[in-house]
Amino acid sequence: MCADHRDEEAIFYAALELKSAAERKAYLKQACGDDVDLLARIQALLAVYESKHSILEAAAASLNVPLQEEPLSEGPGTIIGRYKLLEKIGEGGMAVVYMAEQQEPIRRKVALKIIKLGMDTRQVIARFEVERQALAMGSINVLGSQAALR
Amino acid sequence: MSDVTRILNAIEAGDTRAADKLLPLVYEELRLLAAQKLSQEKPGQTLQATALVHEAYIRLVGAEAQDWKSRGHFFRAAAEAMRRILIENARRKRRLKRGGALHKVGLYDAEWAMNGSSEDLISLDEALEKLSQKDKVKADLVKLRFFTGLNMDQASEMLGISATTAERYWAYARSWLHLEITKAPKTEPSLLVNQGCLRQAIEFVEFF
C-alpha cells in the first residue's frame, strides 16, 4: 500500500517534535500501525534528517553554495572571500562601503560595497567590487573624494 | 529606474505578461556576466554561481530598496535561470566525458567552481523537477537556497512563509530529495555505448 505523501509528511513533522528516540519509536508505531512500508519510509526520511551529509550538501559543496548559516557582522579586519575589510568609508540605506585589501591574485586596495538584503540578520549576500578608476568617475556617490582610498 | 525594476513593479501590480519577460532578461544577464568573467582569463579563475546571481541583482535592480515580494520575483527567476545554466553545463560535460573528449573545453566548460561530478547535479535537478510537480513551494525553497545562496530567513521572506515553516519544509524536502536521488538506478554508459558516442562527441567538440 502506497503511503499518501501528506500522511508521510505530517508524521515526519510530528516525529521531529519528539526529542527522545523512545518517544519517536512509540509515536511511529502508533502512527503507522500495520503499514510497514510507511514506517520504513518515515524512518528513512528521519535518518537523512539526522545525518549532516545528504546529497544536497554534497552538491552544494561542489558548487560552493553555503548552506550553513553564516551570521556575519562585518567590521575592520573581517575577511570576506579574498578581501580583508580595512575601514568603513561610507554607509547608505541598504549598503555600506569599506576600503578593503584584495589578497589575490594581486594585493591592492579596493572599495567594497556590501549590500544588505537581510532584515534582522546582518548577512552579507552581495558584494560589488569597484575599481579605483570607477570611483574617480563618481559612480559611487557615497564617497566624498578619492582621497579616502589613500 | 531599471528595466527589471519596472518589470518587478508590473508583476506586483498584477501584470501577468511582465512575469514572462523577467526570466529571459535575468537568464541573459547571467550568461553575459559569466562570459565576461571567463573572457577576463584571470589565472585560477572560477565562476561561483551564487556570487553571479547577486552581481546580476545589483546590475539589474541596483541598490534601491525593494520589498520582499519584488525581490522574491527576481530571486526566483534568478534561481531558475542559474539552474538552467548549470544544468546545461553539466549535461555538456557529461556528453563530453562519455565521448572521452573532455580535454577540449569550450566557453562554459570547466570554469564553473564545480568540484563534484556533473552527475550529482543532474540527478539533483531531475529530483527537483519531480518535487516541483508534487510540491512547488518546497521545490522553490530548495532552488532559492541552492541556486542563489539565500539563507533560510531571506528565502522564507521571499516565499511568504514563516521561518518555522521554512525550516520544516527544508527538512522534509532535503530528506525527500536524498531518498529520491539515491533510489534511482544510475545508468552507467556501457563500453559499447561509449564507443558509439565517441565520434559524435568529437564532431561536437570540433564544432565548438
Image (cartoon, coloured by chain):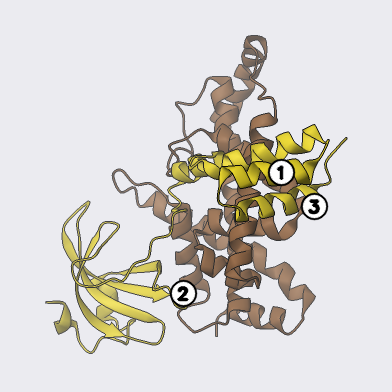
Chain colours: A yellow, B brown
Marker disc for residue A114: none
- Against B5, residue B144 (above or below) is above
User: For the residues carrying marks 2 and 1, which lies nearer the camera in this image?
Assistant: 1
Q: Would you say B19 lies left or right of B114 here? A: right
Please tell me whether mark 3 sits on a helix, a strand or a loop. helix
Residue type highlighted by circle 1: Leu
Please tell me whether mark 1 sits on a helix, a strand or a loop. helix
Residue type highlighted by circle 3: Arg
Instruction: Tell how many labels.
Output: 3
Q: Is residue A130 or residue B148 the one in the foreground?
A: B148
Q: Would you say B87 lies left or right of A102 here? A: right
Residue bearing the label numbered 2: A118
Cα distance in 3D space between marks 2 and 3:
32 Å
Instruction: Give the chain letter at badge 3.
Output: A
Cα distance in 3D space between marks 2 and 1:
38 Å
Residue bearing the label numbered 3: A6
Residue type highlighted by circle 2: Gly
The residue at the far top in this view is B192
- Against B140, residue B201 (above or below) is above
Residue bearing the label numbered 1: A28
